Image (cartoon, rainbow, N blue to C red):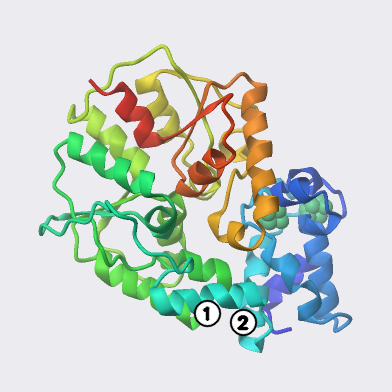
């Protein structure tokens, strides 16, 4: 297996303290020991020592959501996300990725998105030569028409002049998720950066894209000259500038923290500040950096039952503290929580929360 020395060190670094064992959202959903972070590393250590073949453990590699809960918890400071991604790249180059991943890569090749989907009717396309771009990202564009519609509606309400592209480049996040650090991923990222840099300001709707652009592009030396702002932060700015006037209601909102915002970008505050403008904040016990995943649309393509269970368990966390409304800025978590069809608690996107309290 062709992986870095650093990744090998991390694979072997475990002290078997098992502090991370209870926190893997996938392991908790499937009840399978193999889905825990440590078991993944053990599998990889066997491959590194030529005691097993990559083909034997590759499914388990793709069963990691890269949520980083284990990274946060580990006493030895090891990083499963790093070596999981290196293992994927090695599998791609060796031609041993699973058929269901191959299928998504083929869809990307043919249609430009890993879902092989087309834009929904009513997609808020506009190219009006604005200096501001609303960058929706693949999950919202192809899997969450409501997110696209409502994101546009709230910007329209604030009187913002912005472009929203019919042909939007992929940030590279989906390619990175499926193949790790390959030449194709970096090329997608470069292409995207070139398009984003045509704008003065880019409002990035999906925290997965924002985190990827801010962290991974930097690591690869891909320059982003446009000013990037996350959607929840932008909504806060609009409220601060009185372009949006909201009335604080008596409703209680429970934030489902996106791990991209809370852990990777260390920003759990914007969503809470937004909630404070709209009503009462009612947090779950495991919130902020301790958040648990509530959905992943890429993984939902190849392990829907497990992903549904991941979402169900997270909604139960919310119901256990008496949540009335769960609010999320992630289109993947929004769609997957909504798909549960649970009538006991409402699920809203950040902009839906703002829109229901706007004057
Ligand atoms: S990154 Fe998340 S899904 Fe992957 S092993 Fe760690 S806790 Fe589990
Ligand atoms: S927390 Fe770190 S050291 Fe402890 S079992 Fe998990 S991976 Fe190993």
Res. 135 visible in picture = yes
| Callout 1: SS | loop
Residue drawn at (33%, 29%) of the image: 354
State yes or no: discs 2 and 1 in contact (Cβ < 8 Å): yes
Q: Where is the N terminus found, in terms of image quarters?
A: bottom right
Quadrant in which the C terminus is drawn: top left
- Judging by the rendered image, the residue that carries numbered circle 1 is 182
Residue 273 place in picture, x, y as percent: 39, 27
Residue 354, above or below 231: above
Where on the image, by quarter, is ligand 1?
A: bottom right
Q: Is residue 136 left or right of residue 260?
A: left
Looking at the picture, how far across and down is residue 134, in whole percent?
Answer: 26, 52
Residue furthest front as drawn: 121
Does 187 sit above or below residue 315? below
25 relative to 168, above or below: above
Q: Residue at x 72, y 51 (%)?
A: 26
Q: Which mark is drawn over residue 92?
A: 2
Q: Give the percent coordinates (x, y) of residue 286.
A: 64, 32
């Amino acid at each position: 297996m062709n992986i870095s020395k650093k990744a090998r060190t991390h694979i072997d670094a475990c002290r078997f303290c098992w502090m991370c064992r209870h926190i893997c959202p996938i392991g908790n959903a499937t009840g399978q020991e193999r889905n825990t972070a440590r078991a993944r590393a053990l599998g990889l250590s066997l491959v590194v020592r030529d005691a097993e073949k990559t083909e034997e453990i590759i499914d388990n590699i793709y069963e990691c959501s890269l949520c980083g809960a284990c990274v946060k918890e580990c006493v030895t400071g090891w990083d499963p996300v790093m070596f999981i991604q290196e293992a994927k790249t090695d599998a791609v180059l060796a031609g041993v990725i699973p058929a269901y991943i191959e299928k998504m890569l083929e869809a990307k090749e043919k249609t430009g998105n890993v879902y092989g989907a087309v834009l929904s009717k009513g997609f808020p396309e506009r190219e009006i030569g604005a200096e501001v771009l609303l960058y929706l990202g693949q999950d919202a564009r192809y899997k969450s028409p409501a997110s696209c519609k409502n994101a546009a509606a709230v910007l329209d309400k604030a009187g913002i002049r912005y472009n929203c592209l019919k042909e939007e480049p992929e940030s590279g996040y989906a390619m990175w998720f499926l193949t790790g650090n390959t030449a194709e991923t970096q090329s997608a990222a470069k292409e995207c950066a070139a398009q984003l840099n045509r704008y003065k300001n880019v409002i990035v709707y999906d925290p997965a894209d924002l985190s990827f652009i801010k962290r991974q592009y930097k690591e690869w030396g891909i320059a982003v000259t446009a000013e990037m702002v996350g959607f929840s932060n932008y909504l806060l700015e609009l409220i601060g500038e009185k372009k949006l006037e909201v009335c604080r209601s008596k409703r209680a909102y429970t934030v489902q923290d996106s791990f991209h915002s809370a852990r990777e970008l260390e920003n759990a505050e914007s969503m809470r500040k937004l909630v404070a403008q709209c009503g009462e904040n009612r947090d779950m016990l495991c919130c902020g950096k301790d958040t648990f995943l509530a959905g992943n649309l890429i993984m939902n393509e190849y392990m829907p039952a497990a992903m549904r269970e991941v979402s169900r368990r997270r909604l139960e966390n919310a119901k256990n503290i008496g949540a009335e409304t769960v609010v999320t800025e992630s289109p993947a978590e929004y769609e997957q929580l909504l798909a549960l069809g649970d009538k006991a608690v409402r699920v809203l996107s950040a902009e839906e929360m703002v829109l229901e309290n706007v004057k």
